[in-house]
Image (cartoon, rainbow, N blue to C red):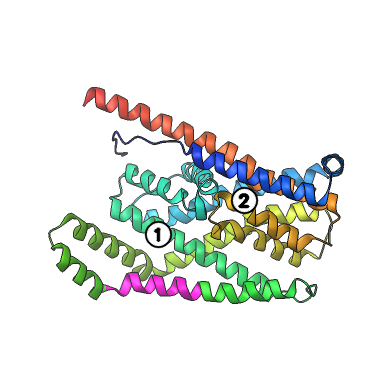
């Protein structure tokens, strides 16, 4: 049963505007540098639409897969959430992720949703953090695997993928250390509880959060590994969209195309600019310059931004607004009858 409260959600208009303006500015700079708008439009008109719509299908279908990452952990705490509800939730969360720095906005929405479903806030926070770190671990594993499995790489791209392999290993080590610190930090938490007073609400919250997190990660290890596997599936489906867009230009062999798709997808996660605007385009330009002609490169960036950024923002933002309006209506009904 959902909890009701009068918490007011605000649509992140500022983040949306910043993300769209910075992205548009980055596109404009690249277009001015490499090609004319007329040539770009001509190239776009010749691009096979089958690749475009297929890529869009996989990007949106990834929401369904990603929903199961959260659902798998929520089920361990007794919350059975239908797959379609999770897909809708992840669509809205994806919107917030695209319009907030470091792709961090979606987690807050998921936490709030789980709280409304009946989980206590420490439990919801443990699910979101556990699912988030599972996703980051999956991303690092996928980045390392795709880069390490390459057998033939152009000389100018070899240093890039070597850096990806090294960075992925370092990131996995950091994530493992963080997981261990949370689970094994009994001494630190005892010290914190003594400072705050064992009966304080903060101490009780931290105690329940750590206990729930340990239950999800350490005591249900097989289920958590399954969560990581789901996250890997999500990224494979999601990056297959970029793979298909690149396939429309017929460049490289398939595995290298997918490795490049993963490379493009990693950039927004670590960018302080909403949606990774600018950084993603810069990486695309650096990697594909010389492989695609100027008109083709600009066309790819337009197609890619449309599939992974603009359309998901439009659809996810619509879902988010409808969710907020629905929650607000329920809160008003509750306050009138309370």
**Kind of element beneath mark 2:** loop
Residue at 56% x, 62% y: name it: 232
- From the top left corner, tell me how far across and down residue 100 is, in percent: 50, 48
- From the top left corner, tell me how far across and down residue 230 is, in percent: 53, 60
Q: Looking at the picture, tell me which residue is in the foreground, 317 or 18.
A: 18
| Location of residue 188 by image quarter | bottom left
Going from N to C along the chain, the mark reached first, 2 or 1, is: 1
Position of residue 21 relative to residue 261, above or below, is above
Q: Which residue is mark 1?
A: 129
Measured in 3D between alpha carbons, the distance from the residue under mark 2 to the one under mark 1, in whole angstroms, is 25 Å
Magenta residues, dominant SS class: helix
**Kind of element beneath mark 1:** helix
Q: Looking at the picture, tell me which residue is in the foreground, 222 or 158.
A: 158
Residue at 36% x, 45% y: name it: 112
Q: Which residue is mark 2?
A: 277
Specify the quadrant that holds the C terminus: top left
Position of residue 104 relative to residue 188, above or below, is above
User: Is residue 48 in the magenta section?
Assistant: no
Whether pointer 2 and pointer 1 mark residues with C-beta atoms closer than 8 Å, the reply is: no
In the displayed structure image, the side of residue 149 where residue 85 appears, left or right:
left
User: Is residue 181 in the magenta section?
Assistant: yes
In the displayed structure image, the side of residue 314 where residue 219 appears, left or right:
left
Position of residue 325 relative to residue 21, above or below, is above
- From the top left corner, tell me how far across and down residue 235 is, in percent: 59, 58
Few, some or many residues within 10 Å of mark 2 (<14, 14–19, 20+): many
| Location of residue 162 by image quarter | bottom right
Residue 54 can be seen, yes or no: no
Residue at 29% x, 35% y: name it: 4
Bounds of the magenta segment: 172-185
């Amino acid at each position: 049963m959902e909890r009701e409260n009068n918490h007011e959600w605000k649509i992140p208009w500022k983040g949306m505007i910043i993300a769209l303006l910075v992205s548009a500015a980055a596109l404009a700079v690249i277009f001015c540098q490499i090609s004319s708008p007329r040539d770009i439009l001509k190239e776009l008109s010749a691009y096979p639409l089958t690749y475009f719509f297929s890529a869009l299908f996989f990007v949106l279908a990834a929401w369904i897969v990603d929903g199961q990452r959260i659902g798998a952990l929520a089920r361990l705490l007794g919350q059975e959430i239908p797959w379609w509800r999770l897909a809708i939730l992840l669509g809205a969360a994806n919107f917030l992720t695209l319009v907030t720095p470091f792709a961090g906005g979606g987690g807050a929405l998921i936490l709030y949703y789980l709280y409304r479903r009946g989980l206590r806030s420490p439990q919801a926070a443990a699910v979101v953090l556990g699912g988030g770190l599972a996703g980051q671990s999956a991303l690092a594993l996928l980045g390392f695997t795709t880069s390490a499995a390459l057998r033939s790489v152009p000389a100018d791209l070899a240093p890039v993928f070597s850096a990806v392999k090294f960075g992925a290993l370092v990131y996995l080590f950091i994530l493992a250390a963080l997981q261990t610190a949370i689970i094994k930090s009994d001494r630190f938490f005892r010290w914190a509880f003594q400072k705050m007073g064992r009966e304080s609400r903060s101490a009780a919250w931290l105690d329940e959060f750590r206990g729930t997190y340990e239950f999800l990660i350490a005591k249900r290890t097989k289920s958590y590994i399954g969560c990581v596997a789901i996250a890997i599936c999500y990224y494979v489906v999601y990056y297959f969209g970029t793979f298909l867009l690149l396939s429309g230009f017929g460049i490289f062999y398939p595995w290298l195309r997918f490795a490049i798709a993963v490379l493009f997808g990693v950039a927004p996660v670590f960018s302080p600019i909403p949606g990774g605007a600018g950084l993603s385009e810069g990486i695309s330009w650096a990697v594909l310059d010389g492989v695609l002609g100027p008109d083709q490169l600009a066309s790819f960036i337009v197609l890619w931004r449309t599939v992974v950024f603009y359309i998901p923002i439009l659809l996810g933002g619509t879902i988010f607004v409808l969710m907020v309006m629905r929650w607000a209506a329920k809160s008003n009904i509750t306050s009138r009858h309370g």
